[in-house]
Amino acid sequence: MEAYSAARDLVSKGDYVFLDANENPFGTWNRYPDPLQIDPKTILAKIKGVEVANMVMGNGSDEILDLVYRVACNPQKDEALSLAPSYGMYYTLANLNDVKFNEVMLNEDFSFSTQRLLNAVTPNTKMIIICSPNNPTGIAYPTEQIIEVVKNFKGLVVVDEAYNDFSGVESCINYLKDYDNLVVIQTFSKAWGLASLRAGVGYMSKELAAMINKVKLPYNMDGFTQKSLVEKLQDVEGFKRTVKLLVSERDRFMANVATLPYIEKVFRSDANFFMIRTAKHKELQQYMINNGVILRSRHGMPMCDNCIRITVGTPEQNDLAFRLMQKFGK
Ligand SMILES: *Cc1c(COP(=O)(O)O)cnc(C)c1O
């Protein structure tokens, strides 16, 4: 397939008179944005130790995932494989792309078995998606174990690292140069605090990045978002401070919740959320809603019977939620 081309692709950056794209010459946001998002990518490439040519940016990481499906899988023929329970979007996007979706259950302690995962590969499996740290369980898998999967599977291994910044676990980005079937997806929606902008990044081989950049809609990331990312990326220190605060708040919040008699289990977490198990999950969720705090029930997902997922908020929000949870128990 040939890529959509714009006349502006012919020139590099500079002070031109633009009479090529039927834009309005007046205003602030009147020009089409850079389809390859070179400015934010250049800064991010330095931070992550990759090259701009290894990157794809999208309208949230959900768009990148969708693009990987579209490029890697033939509808009605190819299959994707993932672990369960995990992020519901993998299944939704498989459905949207008419791709069969297979799942392998996690172990009881929310780790996974490399052998069971690889045994579930069929001749039509084109990609394996691994979310680490996993949503909703909160647990990060060892990087070496994920790389073991990458080594032993011929198709793409997509690692969703939406929560990696909270984990202290080595990012799979460090292995991109060794494996051209590895795709790492990250987002600005969580640790960077920009969920409203809709910005995600995929890191992958240059060949695959070129293919996806050709397939994506040319202006998939708007100019306001690109400009905001460039600004936000100047403040890496601020980013680190926020992550540190959220991680320490997570540990404090979890320790508090673990003291409540009606909580059967607080699961370990490497993310900015954690799961709890209680037979009173329904009543607790309703009580919290009645008092203005929304928690996410995960009851009904595989292995998540009686579970609720709690996102870490500000210290004040966490204190408020904990006080309500104490009151609920009385
Ligand atoms: C929140 C989340 C994302 C982020 O999606 P965006 O489209 O970038 O907002 C990706 N993967 C997982 C597992 C998530 O929980």
Image (tube, rainbow, N blue to C red):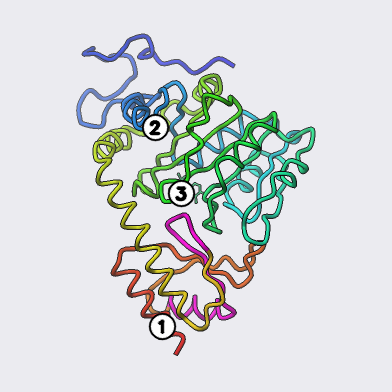
| Mark closer to the chain start, 2 or 3 | 2
Whether label 3 lies within 8 Å of ligand 1 gets the answer yes
Badge 3 is on which residue? 163
On the image, the x and y values in percent for residue 155 come to: 68, 30
Please state which of residues 100 and 318 is positioned toward the viewer in this rendering. Answer: 318
On the image, the x and y values in percent for residue 5 come to: 45, 15
Is 60 included in the stretch rendered in magenta? Answer: no
Image quarter for residue 69?
top right
The tag on residue 48 is 2
Relative horizontal placement of residue 38, taking residue 207 as reference (left or right): left
| Mark closer to the chain start, 2 or 1 | 2
Please state which of residues 89 and 113 is positioned toward the viewer in this rendering. Answer: 113
Image quarter for residue 255?
bottom left
| Mark closer to the chain start, 3 or 1 | 3
Q: Residues within 10 Å of mark 2 (few under 14, many from 20)?
A: few
Badge 1 is on which residue? 326
> Between marks 2 and 3, how big is the CA–CA gap?
15 Å
Residue at the image point whose x is 61% and y is 32% from the top: 70
Q: Which residues are magenta?
A: 268-289
Residue at the image point whose x is 31% and y is 57% from the top: 245
- Amino acid tagged 1: Gln
Q: Are marks 3 and 1 in contact (CB under 8 Å)?
A: no
- Amino acid tagged 2: Lys
Q: Are marks 2 and 1 in contact (CB under 8 Å)?
A: no
Q: Residue furthest top?
A: 10
